Each structure stands twice: as C-alpha cells, then as structure tokens.
C-alpha cells in the first residue's frame, strides 16, 4: 500500500474534496499524510508614486494575505487529520503561480501519491490550473477528486482505462496498491483494433492474473470526441468508485486545438481518477 501521501489544499475554492479524500485514503492505507496549502501572490505590482518603499510594503502585504489564505485552508485539514488520529505534517506556502508549482511538484517527488481536487467550472482561478501543471511535473501519480466529492473514499470497484500506451501502463503500475484492495476490476478499452497486439486488451487480464488479480473486460468503439463521455458512461453504468488512466498522451497544444480526453476529464469527472503522465 501507499505509505507516504501528499495532498494539495486549495485556497481559491473549497478545500473539502481534497481534505475528505486524502484523510480517508490515508486511513485506508495506514499512510503518513503531508498537506500543503498554497496562497497565490499577485503577478503585477501596481504603480505607486511613493516609490520603492511603498512597493515593498505592497509586496509584503500581498505575501501576508496569501499566507493567511493558506493557513485558513490548512486549518480545515488539520481539524480532520487530528480527528482521524493520522500521522501528518502540514505546510502553508505563498508565492507566485510559478513558484508554487515548482515547490509543490518537488515535494511530490518524494511521496508515493499526490492527492488533488478537480478545478471548479466557474472562474479562471490559479488553483484550477495547478492540477494540470502538477500532473506534468511531479513525476508520479495524482489521485484527483471531483469538486463535488464529500465523505470517505473507497475503491472497491475500479475501472482501468487501457489503450496500450506508455501512459496507460504507467497509471496501471502506479495504481497497483489500490487494485489489490479492490473487489471488482474492469478493463475499459475503446477502439481496440487500433492497439498493438502485444498490448491488446486481451493481454491485460493475463498480466493482472499473474499478480493474483482478475478483471472483466469492456471493449467499445467510439469517435475521438466521444472517448471521455463513453468512459464516464461506463463508470456510471458499472457503479465504479475509481478510474485509472494515463494523462496527456498528446502535447497540451494539441489537446487544446483538437480536444483531449485528459482536458475533458478534468472538466467533467464524476468519480475520482488516478492519473499518471
């Protein structure tokens, strides 16, 4: 099982999904949980006629307000972690968006798994953009909880999204601790005829069986634009608790121009998703 978890606690939207998800996962795993709450400083310093001292005062005030937001969000986490009698540490962090991404990504590299929450659809806040950057820069898996998530996390019914790619394989291996705890595993493949024979959906159950795991298989055809919605439809029909999938199989520019499963999943996820890049 995972023994070292890092959770990002947002300050520009509700902290509850990340707090509930990470605390319940740490209890499930018997893991140490480290939390980081991030307050963002302003990018642009306003012109002040008073000169350098006034600018310095504004920058200091901006930093203090960012730290205050981080500490308030962190207090929500600490209340729940103490109630659950977890082993945990917590950190309040303030900085620009780039500084926050660099620091949190570096922290994640010495943890087994990072927990984050989905960006909310209203508003272009920096917490919403952080998720995408962390997926690309941490070097490990992210467990993303929908912004509607409340309560305890469970992973008794897991769907493994399989397209034979490097990213799908990475997510599969990263999810192994949870797969071994599940009651039901289901492999989900769309457009199987396009996959290499060596990594076909027929080969995946054989691999899982060598690890003592059994899985049923769902294989469908879908247009490129319907991949994400088809996956979520299967998740709903099969009452899945968790999806496992690779993230950003194409450059983000391609995802933006042509549409992408990762980007759409960030927008529309209905259940937790373990994602690896």
Image (tube, rainbow, N blue to C red):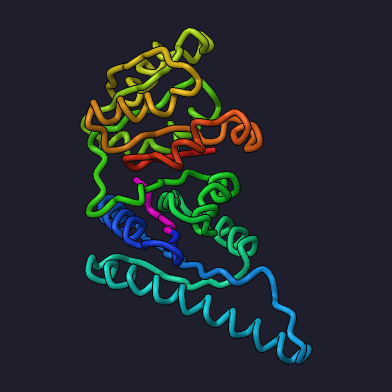
Residue 3 lies in the magenta stretch: yes
Q: Quadrant of the C terminus?
A: top right
Q: Which residue occupies the foreground of this view, 226 or 94?
A: 226
In the figure, residue 1 lies in which quadrant?
A: top left
**Picture residue at 31% right of the left edge, 55% below the top:** 26
- Read off the magenta span: 1-7
Q: Position of residue 218 (x, y in %)?
A: 32, 16
Q: Tell me if residue 240 comes above or below residue 123 in the rendering.
A: above
Residue 248 is situated, as x and y percent measured from the top left of the image, at: 56, 35
Residue visible at 51% across and 13% down?
195
Is 150 left or right of 32, judged from the image as shown?
left
Q: Is residue 154 left or right of residue 91?
A: left
Q: Is residue 183 above or below residue 56?
A: above
Locate residue 276 relative to residue 14 in the image: left or right: right
Q: Position of residue 85 (x, y in %)?
A: 24, 68
Res 42 quadrant in image = bottom right
At x 60% / y 28%, what residue is drawn?
Answer: 258
Q: Can residue 124 be seen?
A: yes
Does residue 241 show up magenta in the picture?
no
Figure check: 43 above or below 209: below
């Amino acid at each position: 099982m995972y023994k070292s978890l890092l959770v990002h606690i947002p300050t520009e939207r509700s902290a509850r999904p990340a707090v509930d998800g990470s605390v319940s996962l740490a209890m499930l795993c018997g893991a140490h949980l480290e939390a980081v709450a991030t307050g963002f400083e302003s990018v642009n310093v306003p012109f002040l006629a008073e000169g350098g001292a006034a600018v310095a005062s504004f920058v200091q005030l901006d930093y203090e307000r960012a730290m205050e937001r981080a500490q308030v969000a962190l207090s929500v986490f600490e209340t729940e972690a103490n109630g659950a009698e977890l082993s945990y540490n917590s950190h309040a962090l303030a900085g620009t968006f780039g500084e926050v991404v660099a620091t949190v990504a570096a922290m994640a590299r010495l943890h087994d798994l990072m927990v984050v929450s989905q960006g909310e659809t209203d508003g272009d806040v920096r917490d919403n953009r952080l998720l995408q950057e962390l997926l690309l820069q941490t070097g490990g898996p992210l467990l993303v909880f929908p912004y509607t998530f409340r309560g305890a996390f469970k992973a008794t019914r897991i769907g493994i999204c399989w397209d034979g790619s490097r990213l799908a394989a990475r997510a599969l291996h990263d999810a192994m601790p949870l797969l071994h705890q599940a009651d039901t595993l289901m492999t989900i493949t769309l457009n199987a005829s396009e996959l290499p024979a060596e990594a076909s959906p027929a080969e995946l159950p054989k691999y899982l069986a060598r690890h003592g795991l059994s899985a049923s298989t769902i294989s469908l055809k879908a247009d490129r634009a319907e991949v994400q919605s088809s996956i979520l439809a299967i998740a709903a029909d099969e009452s899945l608790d968790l999806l496992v999938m690779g993230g950003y199989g194409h450059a983000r520019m391609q995802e933006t121009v042509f549409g992408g499963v990762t980007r759409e999943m960030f927008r529309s996820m209905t259940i937790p998703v373990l994602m690896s890049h």
